[in-house]
Image (tube, rainbow, N blue to C red):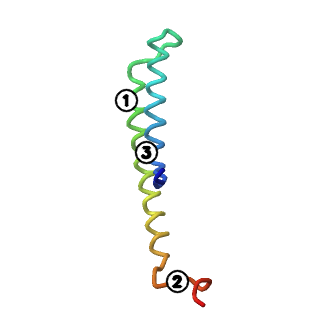
């Protein structure tokens, strides 16, 4: 299996959209009453939060990559 990089922005977006779906599924099933206007701030706020998380994660990833050097083997491999 190929490994992939962790993307926390997509995780946050998926969690918020899943929460919105669960809220409206509960409303449709009769478990509780969800007002129609709840989705707009929930989804827009969640997507803004996901964008901010993705921006921070990207900057951290770039900063870590800039600190690495690929000039040659490390001191443990140079004999």
Q: Mark 1, residues whose alpha carbon is within 10 Å: few (<14), some, or many (≥20)?
A: few
- Residue at mark 2 to residue at mark 1: CA–CA distance: 53 Å
At horizontal 46% and vertical 80% (from top left) the residue drawn is 70
The mark that comes first in sequence, 2 or 1, is 1
Could you tell me residue 33's position as x and y percent?
A: 48, 13
- Residue at mark 3 to residue at mark 2: CA–CA distance: 35 Å
Report helix, strand or loop for mark 2.
Answer: loop
Report helix, strand or loop for mark 3.
Answer: helix
Q: Mark 3, residues whose alpha carbon is within 10 Å: few (<14), some, or many (≥20)?
A: some
**72, above or below 36, in the image:** below
At horizontal 39% and vertical 19% (from top left) the residue drawn is 36
Q: Nearer the viewer, mark 2 or mark 1?
A: 2
Q: Nearer the viewer, mark 1 or mark 3?
A: 3
Could you tell me residue 52's position as x and y percent?
A: 43, 51
Is residue 5 rendered to the left or right of residue 78? left
Could you tell me residue 55's position as x and y percent?
A: 41, 56
Say if mark 2 contacts mark 1, CB within 8 Å: no
The mark that comes first in sequence, 3 or 2, is 3
**72, above or below 23, in the image:** below
Q: Which mark is residue 73?
A: 2
Classify residue 42 by image quadrant: top left
At horizontal 48% and vertical 54% (from top left) the residue drawn is 3
Q: Which mark is residue 40?
A: 1
The mark that comes first in sequence, 1 or 3, is 3
Q: Nearer the viewer, mark 3 or mark 2?
A: 2
According to the image, label 3 marks what residue? 10
Report helix, strand or loop for mark 1.
Answer: helix
């Amino acid at each position: 299996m190929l490994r992939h990089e962790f993307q926390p922005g997509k995780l946050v977006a998926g969690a918020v959209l899943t929460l919105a779906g669960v809220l409206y599924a509960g409303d449709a099933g009769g478990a509780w009453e969800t007002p129609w206007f709840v989705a707009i701030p929930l989804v827009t706020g969640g997507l803004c939060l996901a964008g901010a998380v993705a921006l921070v994660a990207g900057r951290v990833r770039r900063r870590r990559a800039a600190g690495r050097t690929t000039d040659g083997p490390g001191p443990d491999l140079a004999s």
